[in-house]
Image (spheres, rainbow, N blue to C red):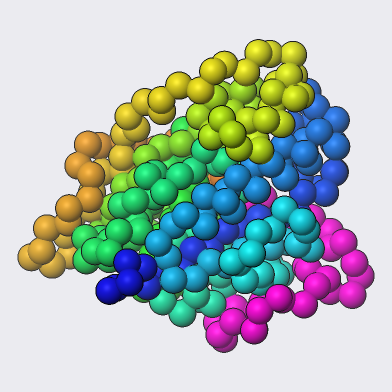
Amino acid sequence: MTDGLTSTTLLVIAKEPVPGRVKTRLTAAYSPGQAAALARAALADTLRAGLLLPVRRRVLVLDGRPGDWLPPGYEVWPQVAGGLDERLAAAFAGAGGPALLIGMDTPQVSPELLAPATRPDAWERADAYFGPALDGGFWALGLAEPDPALLRGVPMSVPETGAEQLRRLRAAGLRVGGLPALRDVDHPQDVPLVAAEAPRDGEFAAEARRLGAAGATVPQRTPVPPSTPVPPSAPSSPSTPTSPSTPASPSTLDPPSALDPPSAPVSPSAPVSPFAPTSPTPPAGGRR
């Protein structure tokens, strides 16, 4: 693109940070209100990072209502009803072109971490990008030509989720580029570790410091160690992918907790999200 932007749509899938509806596994050490405050901070940092990416379009795919944590620059689509696989498939279908999806559980995300999937020649180098989470699953998924069949039927919320999603991509003959492995915020012990990698001036690190990380001291931010990328796929054509070549094992992948199935709707007027999208209804292929 001559203006420095890629044709990619950024998709951020998230839940409204309402106490009792988000980050319930954090309540082993935090109150529901504190867990929701951490979720809100993580989402705010994620959305802020998204504004720095050289993408053509930014969309928040939301279960719930937008709040004052939503910055300008994002369209809002309500999540469709159904399982996580259906909701992800619908989000990609609505993008109508190359798309990169991330969740809300990795506030340490940055343009540098997503650079392989957002550079101008990203889709010449690979057909898909996959970012594994340290505890399994994936925190990022990019598709040059989104096909709902690549996601529908993938078992979610089981230890094999990430490995099965990666297998789907490769079985389709796609060249898969690797993104760094990240820790997501799932359990109380993740909070200080992720806060140490998140921007020091960001909301998540500040909230973790304020809450004391459940009695633990949040360490000073240290550089994120080099991550092991996903091994490249075998090429489906004579061309050779230029995705990272150091192998990483996807055998213990789990789904990212930010993408848990949606909670009960906050209003009886709509099955998933009680608000109208703040942007025009996206293309057919998934109800918005």
Q: Is residue 195 in view?
A: yes
Q: Is residue 152 in view?
A: no
Q: Position of residue 133 (x, y in %)?
A: 47, 39
Q: Which residues are magenta?
A: 259-288
* Residue 188 against residue 256 in the figure, above or below: above
Quadrant location of the N terminus?
bottom left
State the residue at coordinates (77%, 39%): 37
* Residue 102 against residue 73 in the figure, above or below: above
The residue closer to the viewer here, 16 or 245, is 16
Q: Position of residue 274 (x, y in %)?
A: 83, 71
The residue closer to the viewer here, 42 or 24, is 42
* Residue 284 against residue 125 in the figure, above or below: below
State the residue at coordinates (77%, 56%): 68
Image-quadrant location for residue 220: top right
Q: How many marks?
A: 0
The residue closer to the viewer here, 261 or 62, is 62
Q: Position of residue 231 (x, y in %)?
A: 26, 43
Q: Main secondary structure of the magenta part?
A: loop
State the residue at coordinates (59%, 53%): 47
Image-quadrant location for residue 34: top right
Residue 268 within the magenta-colored segment of the rendering:
yes
Quadrant location of the C terminus?
bottom right
The residue closer to the viewer here, 176 or 102, is 102
Residue 260 within the magenta-colored segment of the rendering:
yes
